[in-house]
Image (spheres, rainbow, N blue to C red):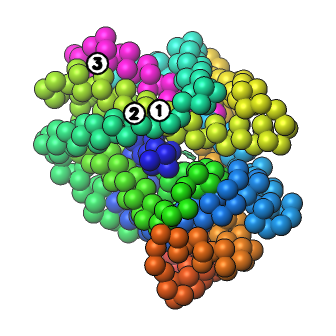
Amino acid sequence: MAAAGSAVGLGNIWKFPYEVGQNGGAAFLLIYILCVVLLGMPVMLSEFLIGRRARANVAGAFRKLSGGNRWVLMGLLGVVCAFFILSFYFVVAGWGIEYIYQAACNNFAGKTTDGLARFFADFSSSSFRPLLWDVVFILLTLYVVVAGVEKGIERYSKILMPFLLLILILLCVRSVTMDNASAGLAFLFKPDFSKITPTVILSALGQAFFSLSLGLGCMITYGSYIRSDNNLMRTVAQVSVLDTIVAVLSGVAIFPAVFALGIDPAQGPQLVFVTLPSVFTQMPGGYIFAILFFVLLSIAALTSTISILEIMVAFVSEEFHCSRKNAAIVTSLVIVISSALCSLSLGADTRLTLFGRTLFDWCDFLVSKILMPVGGFFIAIFVGWFCSKKDVRDELSHGAVVSEWFVNAFLFLMRFVVPIAILLIFLNELGVFDLLS
Ligand code: PHE
């Protein structure tokens, strides 16, 4: 449940639709699913396996299993990645809180789609309110991590997440029954292969890793808490399938409406915040559904921020020998600053850009296009080449019957297929050669 809570979050409902919109629709979805199945699921299995075998935090796990300090750098990579994710993730989570408030005040009612777009643009480029909610969300996460009430949150989210699914399904029904909805469904499900470019492939890979919480050791940490008789393959399948279902449902809820309302699908991070409120204004009970939706979205985001902050807190408290509480406070303070800068970088008067990209975009870019795929690459190399075969076999066969053939196939995947595929996708993006021709 904790792993599913980490995986399902803004990545599915906010990031996935706008990545689909910017990267050509169905062609992106197809490559995304291939990346989830061929690269994401094996890497998740590897992370669980490393974590459960070592029963330690990210850095400790690599130290323990490799018997040296060289791989501890991977722990550091994870912490750096967690820092960049939180810097922009908290900003978006904060937008979610503003939208709970706006929904509760019934402020979407009577607004046209253009009006809602203008509202979002004004809000996200202002200084005070986004910052306020950003800090509120950080404090909320800090509280959960320091008070050690993650278990309670997870129990709640187990009950609440089915409601999120239900609301998503109702949104899908409303969206696909709008005029011209079929254009949106075709955009999402009818691939135009000419849309596939190196950037689309790298984006799909990055999005798969982002959505499944891979490449920074999050699932290593959670793996260390998994019971020893749990069947890891089954857990991987459950988490991945659930995560993909939520992402696809968000797509079905959004794209038919995008086409029905004449919204530009490629407009980026604001896509969901403009489209869904428009859909709410056009459905019976929309007032209640809008509030519920943004509350549940915030809870889904919270179970993800907890898992990311946890990586940093575990690392700082163990490597610098301080209490978890102090580690959590110090890391949160640093993130308050970095995420405030990210938020302000979108501002009209405070636009902070570097080589034409805002700080917000830089963090997103670094995480999805570089750090997570690189993390996945090294995790594959580690399991394929540096873990003992006995460790791998033991972990795969706890609570499951696996043949030697399966173990060998898995190791082959981690030794060759996953690292080479990730490398090719990178070289392809850099233009070193052309995969597609
Ligand atoms: N997977 C989460 C989401 O989709 C984000 C996340 C990334 C969480 C990395 C943990 C680690 O929102």
Q: Position of residue 103 (x, y in %)?
A: 31, 18
Left or right: residue 274 versus residue 35 is left
Q: Residue at x 30, y 22 (%)?
A: 291
Q: Is residue 340 above or below residue 5?
A: above
Q: How many marks?
A: 3
Mark 2–mark 1 CB contact (< 8 Å): yes
Q: Main secondary structure of the magenta part?
A: helix
Kindly report which numbered mark, 3 or 1, lies closer to the viewer in this rendering.
1
Kind of residue indicated by mark 2:
Tyr
Kind of element beneath mark 2: helix
Regarding residue 368, the answer to whether it shows in the image is no
Q: Residue at x 55, y 23 (%)?
A: 140
Kind of residue indicated by mark 3:
Phe
Kind of residue indicated by mark 1:
Gly
Q: Residue at x 72, y 27 (%)?
A: 325
Is 64 inside the magenta-drawn segment?
no
Kind of element beneath mark 3: loop
Kind of element beneath mark 1: helix
Mark 3–mark 1 CB contact (< 8 Å): no
What range of the chain is rendered magenta? 87-112
Tell whether circle 3 marks a residue whose Cβ is less than 8 angstroms from ligand 1.
no
Identify the mark at residue 108; answer none if there is no mark.
3
**Gap between marks 3 and 1, in whole Å?**
33 Å
Identify the mark at residue 152; answer none if there is no mark.
1
Query: Mark 2 — residue?
Result: 156
Task: Tell me the quarter of the picture where residue 158 sits.
Answer: top left
Is 93 inside the magenta-drawn segment?
yes
Count residues near mark 3 (Cα–Cα under 10 Å), then give few for <14, some for 14-19, many for 20+: many
Q: Position of residue 343 (x, y in %)?
A: 60, 25
